[in-house]
Structure formats: C-alpha cells, structure tokens
Amino acid sequence: GWARAVRGLLLDVSGVLYDSGADGGVPIAGSAEAVRRIKASGLKLQLCTNETQATRENFVRKLRGLGFDVSVAEVTAPAPAACRLLRERGLRPHLLVHDDLLPEFAEVDKTNPNCVVLGDAAENFTYANLNEAFRVLIGMEKPVLISLGKGRYYKETDGLKLDVGAYMKALEYACDVQAEVVGKPSKSFFESALAELGVPPEQAIMIGDDIVSDVGGAQQCGMRALQVRTGKYRPSDENHPQVKPDAYVNNLAEAVDIILQHL
Amino acid sequence: GWARAVRGLLLDVSGVLYDSGADGGVPIAGSAEAVRRIKASGLKLQLCTNETQATRENFVRKLRGLGFDVSVAEVTAPAPAACRLLRERGLRPHLLVHDDLLPEFAEVDKTNPNCVVLGDAAENFTYANLNEAFRVLIGMEKPVLISLGKGRYYKETDGLKLDVGAYMKALEYACDVQAEVVGKPSKSFFESALAELGVPPEQAIMIGDDIVSDVGGAQQCGMRALQVRTGKYRPSDENHPQVKPDAYVNNLAEAVDIILQHL
C-alpha cells in the first residue's frame, strides 16, 4: 500500500542518483532513466540533498554531465537555507566548509564572526582548520554552531568518508554546545523542500540511502520514506532500533517502477 | 580542612607544571620549586598525566630540561596502561597516535587490527588519517575503540587545541560505538596511579587544571582534588554543574605551601 496516492517525490542524490567521488562520481544504474520517467509521468520532483561540497549551480552541472535531467530550481540544499537563517538572525559566520561552497556565502558578512558554520569541508578538515573553528567558538560568550547536515558518513567511489556530523560532534563536545542542524533530518529543511515541491507531506515520498537523515527525517514530517539498497546502505540498517522505512527497494529504478504502476 | 592528613600527591603535568607547546613549552612560575619542596618534605609524588604526544622517557627528558626533578617511574601515563589492556584482551590495534608515541607500542602486534587506539595525534589528525581509522572501525563486526584520555581541549603556548576527546566523539558518532577510555578520568587509571604512589585514596590529593578529567575523576576514586587557576583553567569552570573541587588554588606553588603547612 505504500505506493498509493503519490503526487511528488523528494530524492536524495548521493547514493541514490550517483556515487560521489574525487573523479566526479559514477551514476547508479537505472537512476538517470528513472528521473526521466518520473518527469514524463507528471509527478513532481525535487532533489533534497545535504550536499555541501559545491554550489547548487556546479552540483547541477555535474549531475547533468552524468546524464541527469535536473535544474537548479529542483535542488533543495543546506547552504541557501543557512544563508537565510544567518540573515534573519544577524549572524556573521566563521566558515569551515569546502572551498567550492564559498560562493554560496559571497553576500554574507563574515567580519568579526559570532557563529561557526560547518559543512562537509572534506580536505579542508585539517588539524589547523578544526583548531581554528574551535577557538572561534570557545571564544564566544555563548557559542553558536550551525551544521549543514549531521550525516555520520557517506560512500565515495574510493570508500567511506566521515561526514560533517562527525566533525560537528567533535566541536559540540569540545565547546559543550549543541549544534543547530540546517539540512536533513531537520524538520524545517524538509518543509522547505516540500514547499518547493508543491505537494503536501501525505502525498509525497522521500527516497534515500540514509536511514536516519533521509528516512527518519522525512517520516517525522508526515511523509512516507523508502530506503534504497544503494550508496551507503548496509544490511544492518534493516535492524535500526528507531527507524523503519515504509519499504526497502533495491534502487531508485525499482522504486519508480512500483510508484508508476500505482498512478 | 582539605589539606589535612596528606601522605601523597598526584600531579597533572600540562597546565600544572608547564604549559606545553611546539617550542617545548614553558614552566609555570614556582612549579619546579614546588616539586622540589614536595620531595624534600617526604610526601610521595606521582605524575598522573594523559600525555600521549611522547614516550614517557622523552616526556621526562623534556620535563627535566625545564627544571623538574622527576623520573620515568614517577609518571603514570595512558600508553603503558593501554598496552597492558591490549595484551590482556588479545587486541591488535590500528594506531592513530602521535609519531613520538609509537615506540610505546613497539612490542604490540599490529597486524590485521581488531581495534582502534586513539591518542592525541595532533598533526596526525589529518582528514586522511581520520577517514582511515573510521574505515577500520566501521569494517569490524563489533567495533572496539580505545581512547587515551577524553579531554576536550588543552592550552599550548600558541593557543587552545582540540584534545583527543573531540576526535573520540567524532569516531563514536560515525560508528555508533562507545569508546573505552584509558587515562584520566577512568577509575582504573587513577587506581593504577595510586598503586604506584603507594598511598590510599583518602590520604592523597590530586592537583590538576581540568575540572572533569582531573578533579572529577579523582573525586570518583575517593581522593581530594584541587583545581589550579593555571593552564586551561577558565573562570566558568567554577560554575561546573557536576564537579566541585575540594579547593581552588592559584597555582601548584600555592597548593604546596598550604599542604606543607599542615604536615
């Protein structure tokens, strides 16, 4: 019954459309065709990603190069959401993010920082950069740490990599603070994605490879959620103590097959 | 009344005897003389440190160079304790530690690792090394993470630095495991230090700059504990929600003054 009465899909990207990697990544078999079939069916589509290693423009350019028919407007990502939050609260960030994400923060006042914004900085997660972010935070009367997602790890073509959540926990512990998460699984982030999708939660399905950030987060918002057995999926996810997806599918193509059969 | 009936002292080192740093560090005023006075008084003395950036031999050589009259036998440190634990449990470590600590593990079988041992690796806390330790851990059926201390940060001559505890939290979160801590504030570590001191807990005082690892840990073992206002001490420590030292002292020299007056 999980596939009934669907009008829109939120798709995670890394591990669902493609496996990321230093080489630009490789598409997951059948996923480009699945995106085309979703669009041809009239279902609404929005990519809901915690990707913070590139601007949305460059991210979409990469995905199009891998054969995915997607546009910038179809991507909900943490950096633009963080910029809105910084503006609303008058926050000036010290950034520990990937170099390729910096243009997203070009318009933001970064002088005399009163918060730290942490993204998936990858190679920028050096000992020196982590110490610097720590010193900025611990020097604040009331440290404010904003984390673009809180993923534990992700899979690249050359193996698993620690995600931003691990570094967030390091700074949380060192400074005795709790980070504010902008990105999945935060409820407000899913609500933004649903607003851009233009479909209420009960008519939308989230499809992702992360049992907590994708499946758990979406279900908290009243959506159905599927876990694909691609990307970082591990068989032990199926025994997760808190989160149970509405269904498992082998990959995006299989999910789309089933959903289109029920339209 | 806190200074009565004392027969032995456990001293933290960094932040109490000296402030560490890439330049070898600088002694804290009055501390070398305080160590001499302790020894002349007949009180027993043991250094109880979470130092894992050097072998005990090199650590003692550095301290002697800074004017401290101490010997290797007077140092209780995590690496030898970890080696005992590895031997007892047949564990073969993947090491993420400082290069200068490696000789402590020279005799340990490191082939085909079935645990990860994490120390204060400092410059070795690279993105690549953290990912490697993570991959070794996540690849185990039941990940075993051993952390040499769990300090949040420490002070070096050029500023505050993240300590091993922050990286421990990163790996704990990424792998969904709880680390076993060898070092302060673990009870068994303090008990080893007391055994080497040769004094029962109720006749010993711990003196340190870390409100949790030094003061809280020692009190859990039935010892009195003082916090010095040197090293990483911060005024906000005096409002710590869980831990309250038996007394604050401005520095080691002041503590020793008071203790010797009560002999």
Image (tube, coloured by chain):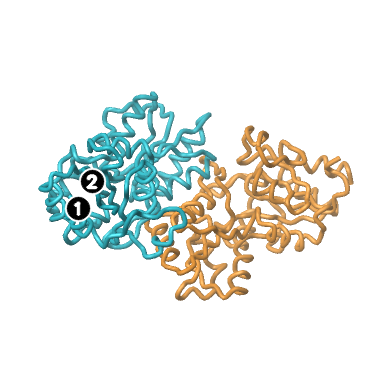
Chain colours: A orange, B cyan
Indicate the amino acid at tag 1.
His
The answer, for residue A39, to whether it is visible in the render is no
Q: Quadrant of residue B155?
A: bottom left
Residue A228 or residue B231, whichever sits in front? B231
Kindly indicate the quadrant of the structure image that contains residue A229: top right
Viewer-side residue, A61 vs B242: B242
Which amino acid, by three-letter code, is at mark 2? Answer: Val
Contact (Cβ within 8 Å) of mark 1 with mark 2:
yes
Locate residue A126 relative to residue B36 in the image: left or right.
right
Q: Is residue A41 above or below residue A54?
A: above
Alpha-carbon neighbours of circle 1 within 10 Å: few (<14), some, or many (≥20)?
A: few
Using a 10 Å C-alpha cutoff, classify the residue at mark 2 as few (fewer than 14 neighbours), some (14 to 19) or many (20 or more): many
Q: Where is residue A158 in the image (x, y as percent from the top left)?
A: 51, 41
Residues under labels 1 and 2: Cα distance? 8 Å
- Where residue B45 appears, as percent x and y from the top left, is 19, 44
**Residue at position x 46%, y 35% from top?**
B136
Q: Is residue B37 left or right of residue B177?
A: left
Q: Judging from the image, what secondary structure is the residue with disc 2 in?
A: loop
x%, y% of residue B213? Answer: 37, 48
Q: Name the residue under label 1.
A: B262
- Residue A29 in sight from this viewpoint: yes
Secondary structure of the residue carrying tag 1 is loop
Q: In this view, does A231 lie above or below A204?
A: above
Whole-percent x, y for residue A96 in the image: 48, 61
Which of the chains bears the disc numbered 2?
B
Q: Quadrant of residue A149?
A: bottom right
Per the image, the residue denoted by label 2 is B6
